[in-house]
Amino acid sequence: MSNQIWWNLTRASANIATVLILGTILWGVLLTTRILKPNDRPAWLRDLHTWMGGLALAFTVIHMVTLIADSYITFDVIDVLVPFASSWRPIPVTLGVLGFYILAAVQITSLFMKKLDRKTWHRIHMLSYVQFIIVIVHTLSAGSDVGTRLFTGFTMAVAMLGAAVYGIRLVAGRSVDRRKKERGLADT
C-alpha cells in the first residue's frame, strides 16, 4: 500500500480538483445569472466561488507535486510545467499543463480584479469554460484509470454536469447580458 500512496494521492487530488473546478464554474454562473434570486446571497456566492477556485488551484498543485513524488511514472518539474516536455502521453499531459496555467491565470487575475480593466478580466475569466473542457479531455486521456467503467462514468457525469451549467449560463445569461447592455453596464 505504501508504494502506491503517491499514485493514490495523485488520482484523488485530480478528481477533487476536477469537481472543484465544476463547482467554481457553477457558483460563478449562479452569481452572474442570479437565477436563484431572491433567495441567493451574492456576497455568499462570491465568497464560495472564490474559495472553491482557490481550493481547485491548491488540489491541482497537489496533483502535480504527487506526480513528481510518485515513482510509477517518472515526472519531473519540467514535465508538469512545460507543454510537450513529458515523454509519457505528451498530448494529454500538455492539456493538463495548459489547464493548470489557465486556472492559475483566472485565479491570479481574480485577486487583482479591481486593478484590471473589466473587459480584460472578463475575457480571462471566460477561459474557465475552455479550461474545464481541457481538464475533461486531459482526465479522459491521461490517467491510469482511463478506460475503467467507474472512472469513465464519473468523468462523463462531471462533463455532463459541466455542459448543463454552461447551458444555464447560455440561456439565463442572455437575459442578464441584455439587461446590462440596456443599463450601459455590459463588459463584453
Image (cartoon, rainbow, N blue to C red):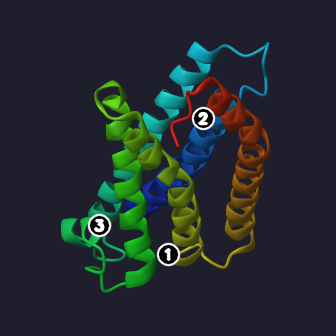
Instruction: Please determine whether, in this image, residue 55 is positioned above or below residue 141.
Output: above
Tag 2 residue: 28
Q: Real-space Cα distance between discs 2 and 1?
A: 28 Å
Report the amino acid beneath label 3. Val
- Which residue is at the front of the view, 137 or 76? 137
Identity of the residue drawn at 73% across and 48% down? 170
Residue 177 location, x and y as percent? 67, 37
Which is nearer the N-term, disc 1 or disc 3? 3
Which is nearer the N-term, disc 2 or disc 1? 2
Residue 98 location, x and y as percent? 38, 65
Q: Which element is circle 3 on?
A: helix
Tag 3 residue: 80
Identity of the residue drawn at 49% across and 56% down? 14
Report the amino acid beneath label 2. Gly
Q: Real-space Cα distance between discs 3 and 2?
A: 28 Å
Instruction: Please determine whether, in this image, residue 74 is positioned above or below residue 12.
Output: below
Splitting the image into 4 quarters, where does residue 171 fall?
top right
Instruction: Please determine whether, in this image, residue 172 is positioned above or below residue 114.
Output: below
Q: Nearer the viewer, mark 2 or mark 1?
A: 2
Q: Is residue 1 visible?
A: no
Residue 135 location, x and y as percent? 52, 62
Report the amino acid beneath label 1. Ala
Identity of the residue drawn at 31% across and 71% down? 71
Tag 1 residue: 142
- Count of numbered badges drawn on the protein: 3
